[in-house]
Amino acid sequence: MNVKKLRTICGRLCGADETLDGAPGSFLAYAAGLPRTSMDIRLDDLSGPEVRELLDDHLADMARLSPPESVHALDIDALRRPGTAFWSAWSNGRLLGCGALKQLDPGHGEVKSMRTSPAHRRKGVARAMLAHIISEARSRSYRRLSLETGSMPAFEPARRLYASFGFTYCSPFADYVDDPNSVFMTLAL
């Protein structure tokens, strides 16, 4: 079955119309169970003020929730380095969220900077972004996708999301070390 036919069938099952084929990322939004609005997930150069504000909020939250030695969030300069791709999710001119994929080696990637705008939480934005990142990792022929997140209760929704995609707990990877404030997860692709 070709992709267009599959999108049409899935779109009808989800109650969406034929516009699913129109905007990049919109199919992922519908597949993730978002309401009948389009979502555009696009590669982002991190220059827009909305994206900068969302990332500033992300870094501030990480600093508030974790001790300094346990904050592993990337700032804008680090997200712009070669080997890291950053995407933002938009709908009707509003920023919904963001996420990044950092190459650790030719077969291993890391999920970074997953963040949903507060007004759009619990609407499937993070689910759609994670699906997009996993798809990109597969298209790059990565064999493994890993992540670090917090161990505190505030990070429980993130851990549940990752587990729902098949991520399992693992030992520290790359340059990470054991840290009671961090949880490490991985997904074999």
Image (spheres, rainbow, N blue to C red):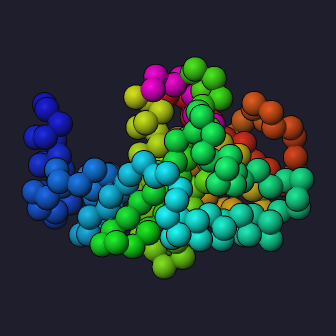
* Residue 157 in sight in this render: no
Q: Position of residue 108 (x, y in %)?
A: 60, 26
Rendered residue at 54%/76% (across/down): 118
Q: Does 59 lie within the magenta span?
A: no
Rendered residue at 46%/74% (across/down): 120
Q: Nearer the viewer, residue 59 or 111?
A: 59
Question: Residue 125 occupies which quadrant of the picture?
Answer: bottom left
Most distant residue in the front direction: 47
Q: Position of residue 50 (x, y in %)?
A: 51, 70
Q: Position of residue 39 (x, y in %)?
A: 32, 62
Rendered residue at 80%/55% (across/down): 71
Q: Position of residue 70 (x, y in %)?
A: 85, 53
Q: Nearer the viewer, residue 175 or 162?
A: 175
Q: Which residues are magenta?
A: 140-146
Answer with left or right where residue 105 lies relative to residue 61.
left
Rendered residue at 31%/52% (across/down): 25
**174 up-or-down from 11: above or below:** above
* Residue 113 in sight in this render: yes
Answer with left or right where residue 181 lies relative to residue 96.
right
